[in-house]
Image (tube, coloured by chain):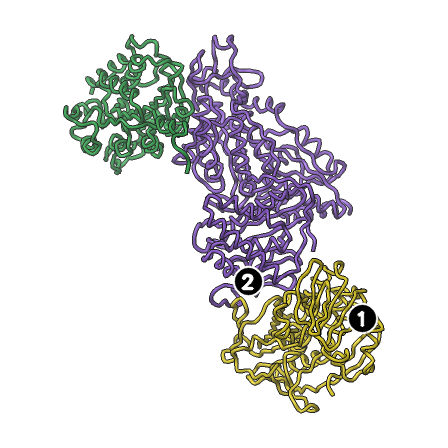
Chain colours: A purple, B green, C yellow
Amino acid sequence: MRYSEITIRFCGIAGDGVVSSGKIFAGACAKIGLHVMVNDIYSAEIRGLGKSSSTIRFSTSKLNSMGDGIDLLVGMAAKESIVDLHDIKQEGSVMYDTSTPGSVVEEDSLVAHITPEIHGYGIPIKQLANEASGTNQGKNLVAIGAICYFYSLPPDMFIEQIKAIFARKGERIVETNITAFRLGYDYFKEHYPLNNQFEISKGLKPKTLISGNEAIAQGAIDCGLKFFAGYPITPATKIMEIAAKELPKLEGWTLQMEDEIAAISAVLGAWFAGKRAMTATAGPGLSLMSEMINMSVMAEIPAIIVNVQRGGPSTGLPTKVEQGDLNIALYGGSGDSPRVVMAPCDSEECYNGIQLAFDIAEKYQTPVIFLSDLFLGQRIETVAIEPNIDRERCTRKRPTPEQLKNYLRYQITDDGVSPLIVPGESGAIYSITGLEHSVTGNPNYESDVHSMMTAKRFRKFESMVADLPQADIIGDEKAVIGLAGWGSTIGSILEGMEIARKRGVTSKLIKSIMIHPQREDLFQEFFASCKKIIVPEMNYQGQYADLLKSRYGIRPIEVHIPSVNPVSPLKIAQKIMEANDELSQ
Amino acid sequence: MSFLSKRSVLEGLNSAKASKTKEWRDNLPTWCPGCGHFTGLHGLYEAVEKLKIPQKDFVVVSGIGCSGRFPFFIKGFGLHGLHGRALPLATGIKIANPALTVVVVGGDGDGVGIGGGHFPHAARNNFNLTYILLDNSIYGLTKGQISPTSPMGMKSGTSPYGNIARPINPTTLALAYEATFVARVFSRERDMVSDIITKAIQHNGFSFIHVLSPCVVFNKLITYNSWHEVVADLPADHDTQNRSKAMGLAASIDPIYLGIFHQENTPSFDDLSQQIKKGLITPA
Amino acid sequence: MKSVIIGAGVAGITAAKTIKEIDRDAEVVVIGDEMFLPYKRYLLTELLCGLLTQDDLIFLSLELLHKLDIKLRMGESVKSIEPSKKLITLHHNEIIPYDKLLIATGCIPSLGLILRPYKSYIQHYYSLNDILVLKNRLPEIKKCIVFGKGVSCLDLISGLYNLEKQITYITKGKRAHFGLKESEFKDKLHDFLEEKGIDIVTEDRIVSIDTSKHGYRVDTLRQKKLTADIIFGWDHYTPNISCIENTSIKKRLGILVNARLETSEKDIYAAGDCMEIYNPCLKKYWINFGFPNALEQGRVAGENMLGREEEYKIYETITFNLMGKSLKARWWK
């Protein structure tokens, strides 16, 4: 068979090196110059029978999602991989270890569950790993070697990648790993010579791999992040780990706090002192931060809160994806509590979007909740991010000398934004509060003052619109089936639209990193041009659909997918086809 | 009762009216006449005046409660934060700009009740913060409910049968939390309050001052008088380097010792983080 | 009742079909070591020549497999059999219990002592996998050497001839006869092939093979030096019965069975090219090769596994299509 796009899944338990398989494989593919997307799934338990899998999709053209189904399953742990057999496409394959010690009964045997629709390839993985290293280490490299031959990928790139990844572990480890790789490659070549051709076009340039979490951390650092305060939480911790390592080198600091309340508090403190600061968390942490986010709204202290959504409510599904935190982000404050909500759809938007978030937060003295999700945050993908580095960036509106003569912290202005100086700067001093306050910052509970100040805080959201990016409209402009989506679901929507287009039904998509505020004019115009509107999202309620319904008065077809896995493009395509059928009736 | 309250009222007013510190006075305090907090405020006026801290570099952070309004009564920058969150807010400010002098003010409910989870971490990190805990053993702003430092048996709107929980001691907590400067003062002793606040601000690292600060309106059990009868200065030979000894003295309830229990010269958060920033310590 | 059939060739699959057609509820597991759906091996040369597609070769389609509810396990081999416990162990240590077991593992071409060291230089020509690999190589092949004696050699030669390859056939015999002692061609086969331009080297054999820049160099016993892009060869076919090692199942070259295709062990049967059956004409045990025979043996084995009492009758002739001419042959005198 000839392929230009492949999806492989490594599946195993702790010690099988599943996640590092994904990393090595993805790294080699990126070196070759292919487009790669990797999605790791693991259980919340670190040890024991916890199953983990790493799915790698690679292609000669740009990838938007993890697609549907897998071409090859590598069952490192036999029993745990059985359920993954269902994900294998027609004519797909599974590799399994024939050198498992002890006997297995049929029910627990991966091999026994292989149907004639797919091909099984037995390899003595453990035995070959032992040949290479004397231990079970390197099992994953045996498998990678086999796959390399199976799809006739260039082994040199893999060997280079093995060297790069294991160099710090010493020469011996590098050598045994390369041996394991070669043994896998040779074994497969000898026993299954009839391999597939992955068509690598000429002139491909090596690409870099980045996860959404990494892109957010890097984007923030590049635009002047000076302080990160956080509390470890899956799946957001990676952002904090990067900040912890990088910020001290840049005169900044990262602090692991005692809880998320302390984290967001310290972030507000740093912004109060005039420094760009952020925190990153997931649902449970965002819940804890609600009160301080309200303080940010009321006292007009900027804040950046990255929320990498996982399954909820409560502790929920720490290691599974869901887009269920839109409502708390939008509406999670007591009182009239406007906040900016942004949602990037890929790593590139994570990088550029977080920089926009900082600019908006600083300029408009508002909290920005940046909604990523577990899939987007942890998946690694090849993207060409244009670095935008300005570590002294500042969008703060400063007072004029005239304004300083009688400085009012909450001066009423047309755009709602009051000029701001910060502690340590000369010219004025002030005290502020989470209580309602007058223009000076002093507590004040008068009805007129409250009305005026509430209006001021909301006015910022109107003036902000001029600074917001346009909404993107993708697809066939003339199409009458329109989709609207947010976050990582966008990738699946784009791929679903492409599947539908190949089946003869065109559609279009409106997407914006801005959830609130939004370029309402553009959305209004888009929806007016559609006869059917489909809003797919990964939650049960249809939280984004609810927002669009109330905001634009539309009646969309809602697709609620409270799935623990990324959305299937095929499912989106089906919805488009169904909408088309309804229209033609 | 009448004698005591008159006297306290006078003391309070006098504290806020000291003329030397005029430059630092801001809005007129909203506390009840006789409130112990006046002494804390006065002490801070004197300390910052004495230390010649530029107002632009001075930040007071508070939580919620009677003590929460503190920032509005003193010049400089002020952040009246959320209930219990003064310490982490101050932490962010101090790390963002280590040149600032940051003083945190809070009450007993704020500091060892709702914000009790933040106290140990601010202390053990040895941030260069001064934390003044004004302890009146009551929730005053909500009109008199028991607090974590209220004695057993205290009756209040939320403890109509009497408080059955044991009171905690903020001074021993601070010692246990590895604070590097721990002192206790009584708001009747104005000079001592000013002196110790000054020393606390000068301390390199986290300094904690437990102020016995009576609520003359809602707390009928713990009063100027009741405290006056049991307070005593720390023994003259007390070794401020000996944390375990300090613990024993701090735990004593009769007498209740006043003074500096512990003061340790050890690298602060700023010192250690600077070493990392300068590349003297490299990551694993 | 669970019937396990080792071997997904014509005999094995026919047995499976027979069982399921008679008893819908019987559980049937077929274990085959090839990675393809059951196919008709005798048509492989037609596939090589492009006269048929891979689908045309399918002997049991997916649809039928599902319809009959046969569990087919492809690409797997049996490591051992324990007749006393009625268990088999697969190569990857999975254990499968059975009530009735059929061994239908066929024959495989193998090399004698002289050629065995050159195994890696000799192209396999036996399985669908071999043919698909070979098909990929075809464009770069011009000169072929074929060595061997069976009728399958003749099949290969006719295939290569159709593909317009240059062929040298090496045989130990005085004439090329492919074991077809009685055929319509009689002794004319040799001349017929030479007329078609096939180079036949008689009374000789390959003794060594070496690689060269453009393929292989071959030395023969009679010190002929030949070159080729590819070498096909096998000395004989042997029943593929390594799975019965360490069992008490009686065998000679193949597994010995009675007329009901029962082996010496209870509830274990054998069918197809892996077994030997008593031939009353020859008055000895003998392997009854060929597609029609395998088909009939599969049917008989299947029925007997269900407890019926069927006897297998030996068929004597095979039909063979040779370069457009129909050829009927018996393989013994």
Question: Nearer the observer, disc 1 or disc 2?
Answer: 1
Can the viewer see residue A289?
no
Tag 2 subunit: A
**On the image, which quarter does residue A321 sit in?**
top right
Q: Position of residue A216 (x, y in %)?
A: 53, 34
Badge 1 element: loop
Between residues B97 and A398, which one lies in front from this camera angle?
A: B97
Q: Where residue A70 appears, x then y in whole percent?
A: 62, 53
Label 1: chain?
A: C
Name the amino acid type tagged 2: Leu
Q: Which residue is tagged 1?
A: C198
Q: Identify the residue at horizontal 25%, vertical 38% (top origin).
A: B164
State how many labels appear: 2
Q: Residue A275: give x, y in percent of width and height.
A: 47, 23
Q: Inspect this view and state whether residue C50 appears.
A: yes
- Distance between mark 1 and mark 2 Cα atoms: 50 Å
| Residue A467 position in % (x across, y down) | 61, 24
Q: At 16% from the left edge and 28% from the top edge, which residue is drawn?
A: B255
**Quarter-wise, where is residue C293 in the image?**
bottom right
Q: Is disc 2 placed on a helix, strand or loop? A: loop
- The residue wearing badge 2 is A110
- Taking depth in this image into account, of B225 and A144 the one nearest to the observer is A144
Q: Residues within 10 Å of mark 2 (few under 14, many from 20)?
A: many
**In the orientation shown, which residue stands out farthest toward the front?**
C223
